[in-house]
Image (spheres, grey):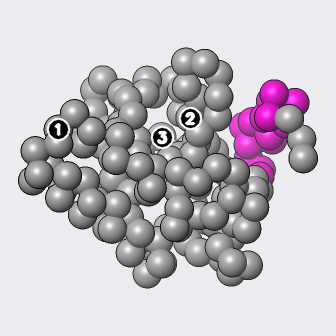
Amino acid sequence: IVNAAEFMPMALELIARGAAVPLVVSGNSMEPFLTAGRDSVILTARRAKKPRRGDILMFTRPDGSYVVHRVHRADGSGVRFVGDAQSFIEGPVPYGHLLAEVRTVIRRGAKVGRHSPVWLYFAWRRAARTFVCRLRGDLGRCQ
């Protein structure tokens, strides 16, 4: 295990040079799609286009922590994120805080791409949960 403060500057430098950097998932905010210690994400340079709902990006919080979550919405004020296991929508995160994009994950040892049925299922599942939260009127937790 390597401290994020030591690993991430090196990883971000490699990503900036065009490398794809694997990172083992920690935390449970993206369960059940990604499980800590079991699954990995492959971090790549972020494409210039606007993030779309369901994309998974790495960003930094104001406290400097690194987070990998799914895009809920992107607009002129920034990007709003939500973990698959969360109901709280975080953001807007300024575009300058977006560090990398996840186009591939290693889930249970198998590669899963952005357009695979498994990825799309969990993206739509997350969107449906947020929609139900809105219907219930819990706008404080589901913006």
Give the residue type at disc 3.
Answer: Ala
* Left or right placement of residue 1 versus residue 140 in this view: right
Q: Which residue is mark 3?
A: 48
Q: Nearer the viewer, mark 2 or mark 3?
A: 2
Q: Residue 120: percent from the left, percent from the top?
A: 40, 72
Q: Main secondary structure of the magenta part?
A: helix
Q: Is residue 59 magenta?
A: no
Question: In the image, what residue occupies the spot 73% across and 68% down?
Answer: 38
Q: Is residue 143 above or below residue 111?
A: above
Q: Which residue is mark 1?
A: 139
Q: Which quadrant is the C terminus positioned in? A: top left
Q: Is residue 98 above or below residue 58?
A: above
Give the residue type at disc 2.
Answer: Phe
Query: Which of the two discs, 3 and 1, labels the residue nearer the N terminus?
Result: 3
| 10 Å crowding of disc 3: few (<14), some (14-19), many (20+) | few
Q: Residue furthest top?
A: 62
Q: Secondary structure at mark 3?
A: loop
Distance between the alpha carbons at the discs numbered 1 and 2:
24 Å
Q: Is residue 32 above or below residue 69?
A: below
- Quarter of the image for residue 36 reads bottom right
Q: Find residue 59 and name its label.
A: 2
Viewer-closest of 126 and 56 = 126
Question: In the image, what residue occupies the spot 41% across and 49% down?
Answer: 86
* Left or right placement of residue 89 versus residue 5 in this view: left
Magenta-highlighted residues:
4-21
Q: Nearer the viewer, mark 3 or mark 1?
A: 1
Query: Which of the two discs, 2 and 3, labels the residue nearer the N terminus?
Result: 3
Give the residue type at disc 1.
Answer: Leu
Q: Are marks 1 and 2 in contact (CB under 8 Å)?
A: no
Query: Which of the two discs, 1 and 2, labels the residue nearer the N terminus?
Result: 2
